Amino acid sequence: TGLFLAMHYTWDIATAFTSVAHICRDVNYGWLIRNMHANGASFFFICIYLHIGRGLYYGSYLYKETWNTG
């Protein structure tokens, strides 16, 4: 979804807000793509948070093999 949003987004400070409004109003299903992207990003960060929390709970940061494998 990020690739589709990047096709219509402009990074310039003067036109960034209007490009987001353009995505939501003028692009076919732009509002849906934007919402899917936001929800997917939130889900990704929840998964990262749970993954780090699991590692802290089980104490896997103490194992040298874990750090050596990257």
Image: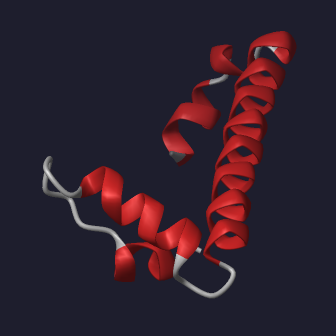
**Nearer to the camera, 12 or 70:** 12
User: Who's the residue at 33% across and 59% down the image?
Assistant: 18
Image height check: is 40 above or below 2? above
Where the N terminus falls, by quadrant? bottom right
Image height check: is 35 above or below 28? above
Asked which quadrant contains residue 37, the reply is bottom right
Image height check: is 17 above or below 48? below
**Nearer to the camera, 33 or 55:** 33
Residue 66: x and y in percent read 63, 35
User: Who's the residue at 13% across and 56% down the image?
Assistant: 12
User: Who's the residue at 50% across and 39% down the image?
Assistant: 68
Looking at the image, residue 1 sits to the left or right of residue 3; the answer is right
**Nearer to the camera, 44 or 4:** 4
**Nearer to the camera, 11 or 29:** 29
Looking at the image, residue 39 sits to the left or right of residue 4; the answer is right
Task: Please identify the residue farthest to the bottom as the structure is shown.
Answer: 28
Residue 45: x and y in percent read 67, 38
Looking at the image, residue 68 sits to the left or right of residue 63; the answer is left
User: Who's the residue at 37% across and 83% down the image?
Assistant: 7
According to the image, what is the colour scheme of the structure? secondary structure
Residue 36: x and y in percent read 73, 63
Q: Is residue 2 visible?
A: no
Q: Is residue 14 visible?
A: yes
Asked which quadrant contains residue 19, the reply is bottom left
Residue 31: x and y in percent read 66, 67
Asked which quadrant contains residue 61, the reply is top right
Q: How many discs appear?
A: 0
